Amino acid sequence: MAVEQTLSIIKPDGVEKNVIGECFRRFEKGGLKIIATKMVHLDQAKAEGFYAVHKERPFFASLVKFMTRGPVVISVLEGENAIQKNRDIMGATNPAEAAEGTIRKDFASNIEENTAHGSDGPDTAKFEIGYFFDAGEIHSR
Ligand code: IDP
Ligand code: MG
C-alpha cells in the first residue's frame, strides 16, 4: 500500500461545534499525519472553485453559502492509504448512513452540514491540495 496525501476540511459547522481537536485526534489515532494546516474563511469564488465539479447539482448554491458562512480548517493528511483512511474516519456523506464512531455520525447535522471533507481519489487529492497549499507549506515527514 502506498503512502498518500489527501485534503481534509473541517467545515464551518465543525468549527462552530468546536471539534477541531477531536477531528485531528481521530486523524492521528487513525494513522494519519497532519503535514499542513490553516484556518481560512472562504469567499464565494474560492468555495465555488473548490466545488466546481458539483456546479450542476441542485444543492450547489446552498453548499457554497454554507461553506462560506464561517472559517474552516484545511489540512493535508499523509499516511498509508490516506485517501480511503480519511474517508473511513469521516463516514458516509449522509450522517444518517454513517457508521458508528465516525466524524459525520458523531457531529454532522445533516447531509449538507456534514462537518468534514476528504478527497475522493488521487487525482482529486492532487487538485485539492494544490488549490489551497503551496509546496513550501507542506511538510511531508
Ligand atoms: P463527499 O463530501 O462525501 O465526497 P459529495 O457527493 O462529493 O460527498 O458532495 C460534496 C458535499 O456536498 C457533501 O459533503 C455535502 O456537504 C454536500 N452534499 C452532497 N449531497 C448533498 C445533498 O443531497 N444535499 C445537500 N448537500 C449535499
Ligand atoms: Mg466528494
Image (tube, grey):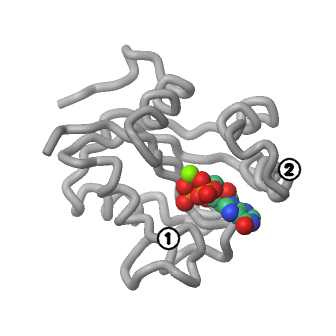
On screen, 11 above or below 130?
below
**Whole-percent x and y of residue 91?**
44, 70
Q: Is residue 10 left or right of residue 99?
A: right
- Image check: 129 left or right of 26? right
Q: Residues within 10 Å of mark 1 (few under 14, many from 20)?
A: some
The CA span between labels 1 and 2 is: 22 Å
Label 1 residue near ligand 1, CB within 8 Å: yes
- Checking the image for residue 65, the label placed there is none
Of 11 and 56, the residue lying toward us: 56
Q: Position of residue 77 (x, y in %)?
A: 33, 42
User: Looking at the picture, which amino acid does disc 2 mark?
Assistant: Ala
Query: Which residue was labeled with disc 1?
Result: 92
Instruction: Check contact, mark 1 vs mark 2: CB within 8 A.
Output: no
Please identify the quadrant where the C terminus is shown.
Answer: top left
Horizontal placement of 42 versus 139: left or right?
A: right
Under mark 1, the amino acid is: Ala
**Which quadrant of the render holds ligand 1?**
bottom right
